[in-house]
Amino acid sequence: MNTTQNTPSGQNDKVEEYDLVILGGGTGGTVAAWTFGGQGQRVAVIERKYIGGSCPNIACLPSKNVIHSAKVASYFRRSEEFGIPRKSFAIDMRAVRERKRSMVSDWNNVYLDNYKKSGAEFILGSGRFIGPKTLTATLADGTTRQLRGRNIIINTGTRATLERVPGLADAQPLTHIEALELDRLPEHLLVIGGGYVGLELAQAMRRFGSMVTVVDRNDRLMHREDDDVSEALQELFQDEGVNIVLNAKLRKVSGKSGQSVTLFIEQGGGEKKLQGSHLLVAAGRTPNTEGIGLDLAGVELTDRGYIKVDERLATSAAGVWAIGEVAGSPQFTHVSVDDFRVVHNSITGGKRVTTGRLIPYCMFTDPELAHIGLSEKDARDRGIAYRLFKIPMAAVMRATTLSETRGFLKALIDVNTDRILGFTGFGVEAGEILSSVQIAMLAGLPYTTLRDGILTHPTLVEGLIPLFSSAPPTNEATRTKPVPRAHRQTTAA
């Protein structure tokens, strides 16, 4: 159905009516479009560039594609360990990029086919609000369309933060987007940020053959993780020849990324200079809330610039919802998908909420870092008594067959119920191992269910048996009263 309205310019433009309009084509919004469209509703997605949003195009999948190429390169360097005489080889970054691009193209076709099957409309253009639940989409040819939705979902995501450091913007640094499009190997890559993106790409480029320096303002890599995780990561990167500069404040940048760039940092009360050929910025994310007319839609922001939502992901404007990173949700694609479930449930009369969710995450370094539930740091801060189970990956038989024994598995167990409070894996395929633990946690099962289960031999998930056999059962006295803070950690050899 079309109606007309007077635009500020005095022109009469048709307003197209929809059951649902989604601003931003990220994964949660894409699944929303397919789902509501498949249920017979009239749905439109306005996305300015990427079919399916960032995940299949410039983030999750492309980065893992490139990381796997780097993994293969690492096997070439280790070939003698596997009984294969080592020969010289070279990295062709153009071929690495084309492999990634081919995968992205394949997924784009899958996504477009799903749009066609669901009946949802994909509009490639720049969208912004011009009034309550009403948006304009500016297409590539300069023409515009006006759309009004009975419900609106904002799904515009985030972008890499570029801090206001003198010379930084002028240096034209890489973000993850440009780093995944490199057609030649950086001679020396400087990485600002020791988090997920920075560490994944730093390791990959080092394995391709670049010199790499990681600069972080904190005193540890992945500083929110437990100490043993940070220490293991730092040891990994040092062993692979990555230079790590911690407690460093970036004061100034000179030069241009891709040619020659210099970082001026403050560290330990003095100033130091770091020089490289390329600069990658991976130090946080900024929500994409500017310039999209949120004030005209009646949508409020938090003090950090994210869209303000309640536990049902409703915004301050009736009938307008926000999902994914722009709503301040944890920055993972799987959370964006669950955000969609919450909104779908809310629109259709359900009561699903975002509170109390058990959210896993994985950093795809090699080996992987995977976590769910409480960390030791979390438990101590909250005064929660726990028993600690921990084994080295060398105790997992399958890991020894792969010669991938770096790292460990550990779990926190409730002292009264034997339920699993948290799990961390730093090891080969840790993200896959985590899923079995997560299912047990979702079901509220005691750790003994995994310990006593018949798991396939030899697999990596079988490592949960030695993990959960690594400490003796608690006695009844321990079960019925909290463990004193000084004695909360018990690890059996």
Image: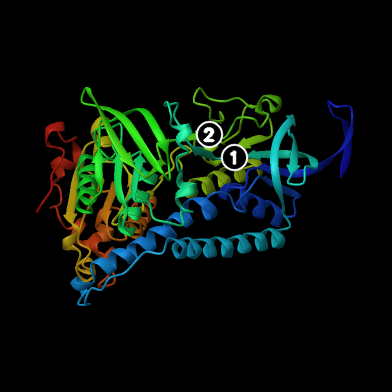
Residue 133 drawn at (x, y percent): 73, 33
Counting from the top left corner in percent of width and height, residue 449 is at: 28, 59
Q: Nearer the viewer, residue 188 or 328?
A: 188
The structure residue drawn at horizontal position 68% and vertical position 51%, both measured from the top left corner, is: 36
432 over 334 or under it: above or below: below
Q: Residue furthest left?
A: 493
Residue type (three-letter) at the residue carrying disc 1: Thr
For the residues marked 2 and 1, what is the alpha-carbon distance in whole angstroms? 8 Å
Q: Position of residue 155 (x, y in %)?
A: 60, 41
Residue 110 location (% of width, % of height): 61, 63
Sequence order check: which comes first, mark 2 or mark 1?
Answer: 1
**Secondary structure category for the residue under label 2:** strand
> Which quadrant is the C terminus positioned in?
bottom left
Q: Is residue 454 visible?
A: no
Q: Residue at x 54, y 54 (%)?
A: 57
| Residue picked out by circle 1 | 156
How many marks overall?
2
Identify residue for label 2: 287
**Lateral position of residue 119 relative to residue 262, left or right:** right
Marks 1 and 2: in contact by CB < 8 Å? yes
In this view of the protein, which residue sits in the foreground, 288 or 45? Answer: 288
In this picture, residue 450 sits left or right of residue 148: left
Badge 1 element: loop
**Front in this rendered view, residue 349 or 159:** 159
Question: Which kind of residue does numbered mark 2 sit on?
Answer: Pro
